[in-house]
Image (cartoon, rainbow, N blue to C red):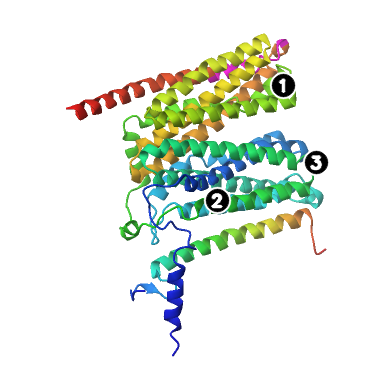
Amino acid sequence: MLNYKRFAVGKLASLGTRYLPFADVASEDVPLSRLLRLSLFQVTVGMAMVLLVGTLNRVMIVELDVSATLVALMLALPLLFAPFRALIGFKSDNFKSALGLRRLPYIFKGTMLQFGGFAIMPFALLVLSGYAEAVDAPRWLGVGSAALAFLLVGAGVHIVQTVGLALATDLVPEEDQPKVVGLMYVMLLVGMIVSAFIFSTLLENYTPGKLIQLIQGAAVITILLNGIAMWKQEARNRERAAAPASDMTFSTAWSQLTARKGMVRLLVIIALGTAGFGMADVLLEPFGGQVLNMTVAETTRLTVVLAVGSLFGFGLASFWLGVGSRPIDVACYGAAIGVPAFGLVIISAINLMPSLLVIATLAAGFGAGLFGHGTLTATMRSAPREQIGLSLGAWGAVQTTAAGIAITIGGVIRDVMLVAPGAGASAARPYLPVFALEAALLLLAVIVAWPLRRRSIAADRAIAVSDGA
Amino acid sequence: MSNDPDKVWPTGLTLSEAEEVHSYLIDGTRVFGFVAILAHILVAVTTPWLG
C-alpha cells in the first residue's frame, strides 16, 4: 500500500508557508522594504483618483462629448460611498474569520470591486457617448452602466484605502506611525503624479481603442500592485479566530468613538482644513491661465509645485513627529501656514505677479502636507488598537466628503461669479472669493484646534509630573 | 503532521477555515462573472458581432 497520503502531507508541510499570502509571524519590527511594498496600494488609489478626476473628466467632456453636468454627476457618485468608510473600518475591526484574518479579506474584496469597475468602464463610457452602433442603445443602459462603473471603482478605492491604512497601523508600533503615514502620503502622491504623466502621454492621440486599453490597463495594474502590496503582510491570529464573535454594534462603537475626548473636535478640524486646502485644487490651473496669463505648461507646473510643497510638508512632519512633536501641533502649523499662503494668492491676482503665485502655491502645498500628516497621525494615535479601523474610517469619511463638497462649492462659487453682473470688470473676480473662503476655513481650523492643542500640552505636563513624582 | 480530527486532508486546514477560503472563491467568481457578462453586453451594444 502506497503511503501517498503521508507523502503528500509531508511535501506540503515542507513547502511550508512560503507560497501562502499570510505573514509567518506578527513580528515586532517590520523592515522598511515590507512597508514600502505595503504602500503600493496607495499608488493604485492615486491612480484611480487621477483617472477619474483628471483624465476621464477631460476625455468624457472633450472627446466623448458627454454633457458637463452628467460628467460632474458621475464623478460625484464615488463620494456617496465615502461616509461608509467608517462602517467598513468598523466591520474589518470586528471581522469574524476562521482563518484569523481581518484586513486581507476586505482588501481582496475592495480590489475586486475596483477591478470590476475599471473592466466595464470604457465600454460603459462608449455606450454612454453613443459611439458606433451604440447610438441606438437605450439611454438607461449607458447612464446606468457608467454609473455602476464609477460606483464600483469608488467603493473599491474607499475599501482598499481604509482597510489598507488600518493594516499599516496594525503592523507598526506607535513611535513608527509617523514614518508610515508619511510613506503612505508620499506613495499616494507618487501614484498620482506618475499615472497622470503616463495617462497624458498615452492619450496624446485619442482613439476609443486607446481609451479601452488605458482603463483596462489600469484595472490590471490595480490587481497586480494590490496583490504585491498585500502579500504576506497580515499575520493569522488564532486567538482572534477562536474568540466568539463580537456583539458590538456599529452605533455603540461609533458613540464610543465620538465620546472620546477631543475626537469630534479632531474630525471637525479635519473637515475644515481639508475643505480649506482642497477647495482650489481644480481651480488653480484655470486661475493661472485666465487671470495671470500663464501658458498650459506653466499651469501644469503649478500643480507640480503644489505636489513638491506637499512632499516637503510630509517629510518635515515625519521628522518632527519622529522626534516627539505632538501631531495636533503639526496640523495647527500646517493650517496656519495656509492662511497667509492663500492671502498671497489673492495679492498675486491683484498685482498680476505669477512668481508670487508660485511661492504661494508652494507654501499652500507645504501647509497641506503638514496638516494632512498631523491629522492622520493624530487619528491613528487617538484610537485603541482594536478600533483602529473605525477611527481611520471616520478620518477617511470626513476627509473625502469634505474635499468633495469643497471642490463642488469652489466650482459653483466661480461659475456663479462668472455670470454675476459686473463680472467682466476683472478676470480675477470669480476666483477671489474662493481663495478668501479657503483662508477663512483654515483660520477657523486653527481656532478650533487651539483648545485641543492646549489640552494635549496640559496632558503631557501631567504625565511628566507624575513621572517625576 | 498531527492527526487533529478537525483538519481536512490534504491541506491541513480545519473545516471552517476551508469553508472560508471557499467563500472567497465563490465571491470572486460571482463578482468577476457578473462583470464579464456586463462587459460583453456593453461591447455587443457598441460593436455587435455575429451579425
- Badge 1 amino acid: Gly
Magenta region includes residue A434:
yes
Residues rendered magenta in the picture? A425-438
Whether marks 2 and 3 lie on the same chain: yes
- Give residue A429's mark: none
- Badge 3 amino acid: Asn
Indicate whether A49 appears above or below A96.
above
User: Are there few (<14), some (14-19), or many (20+) residues within 10 Å of tag 3?
Assistant: few
Q: Residue furthest bottom?
A: A1
For residue A49, say whether it is visible: no
Residue A105: x %, y % from top left: 47, 55
Q: Distance between the residues labelled 1 and 2?
A: 37 Å
Image quadrant for the N terminus of chain A? bottom left
- According to the picture, the residue beneath numbered tag 2 turns out to be A226
Chain-order first, disc 3 or disc 1: 3
Q: Nearer the viewer, mark 1 or mark 2?
A: 2
- According to the picture, the residue beneath numbered tag 1 turns out to be A289
Please tell me which residue lies in front, A379 or A61.
Answer: A379
Chain-order first, disc 1 or disc 2: 2
Please tell me which residue lies in front, A367 or A211.
Answer: A367
Name the secondary structure under disc 1.
helix
- According to the picture, the residue beneath numbered tag 3 turns out to be A205
Q: Is residue A257 left or right of residue A68?
A: left
For residue A195, say whether it is visible: yes
Image quadrant for the C terminus of chain A? top left
Residue placed at 50% from the left, 30% from the top? A315
User: Are there few (<14), some (14-19), or many (20+) residues within 10 Å of tag 1?
Assistant: some
What chain is tagged by disc 1? A
Q: In this view, does A153 lie to the left or right of A460?
A: right
